[in-house]
Amino acid sequence: MMHHLRTTRWTELAAEPEFRALVRARRWFVTPATFFFIAYYLALPVSVGFWPAVMSRPAWGPLTIAYAFALSQFAMAWLLLALYVRRARKFDLQAARIRKHETRELFDARP
């Protein structure tokens, strides 16, 4: 069953400490993860641009350091994905508790 919150109720819900804690916890995880992802992603073109001789050295057979680093970006993205999915389960549980509390209040307030 889906219900919609009025603007005034949404403002009240957004001001509640439980909801604010959820937003803060999610932001505490997502912001550093995003910055890390962008920095890691941009490290390759920056490295190739500033240190082409180093990045073109063989790392393993014909595989250069630049290619190894590029391939490591796939592993890093999957690792960040796994970490987020694991952490998102906790966010979802918190959100479900807030929704349950909100739904209970919504139905208790009906005449």
Image (spheres, rainbow, N blue to C red):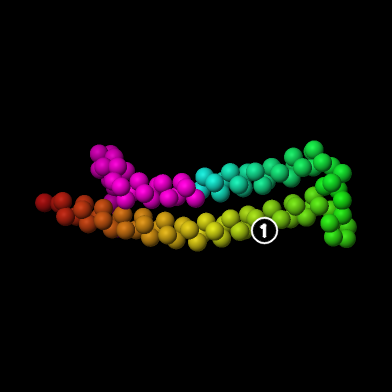
Q: Is residue 46 left or right of residue 103?
A: right
Residue 10 visible in the current orientation: no
How far across and down, in percent of the image, does residue 36 sit?
A: 60, 47
The residue segment tinted magenta is 1-29
What crowding class fits label 1: few (fewer than 14 Cα within 10 Å), some (14-19), or many (20 or more)?
few
How far across and down, in percent of the image, does residue 97 sit?
A: 32, 58
Q: Is residue 56 left or right of residue 28?
A: right
Residue plotted at (22% across, 57% down): 104
Residue plotted at (67% across, 46% down): 41
Q: Quadrant of the rendered structure where residue 51 is? A: top right
Residue plotted at (16% across, 55% down): 108
How many circles with numbers are drawn on the protein? 1
Q: Amino acid at mark 1?
A: Ala
Specify the principal SS of the magenta part.
Answer: helix
Query: What residue did someone put label 1 on?
Result: 75
Q: Is residue 8 left or right of residue 22?
A: left
Residue plotted at (52% across, 45% down): 31
Depth check, front residue: 25 or 3: 25
Vertical order, 7 against 110 (above or below)? above
Does the magenta-highlighted stretch encompass residue 5? yes
Residue 62 visible in the current orientation: yes
The quadrant in which the N terminus is found is bottom left
Q: Secondary structure at mark 1?
A: helix
How far across and down, in percent of the image, does residue 13 sit?
A: 28, 45
Vertical order, 22 against 8 (above or below)? below
Does the magenta-highlighted stretch encompass residue 13? yes
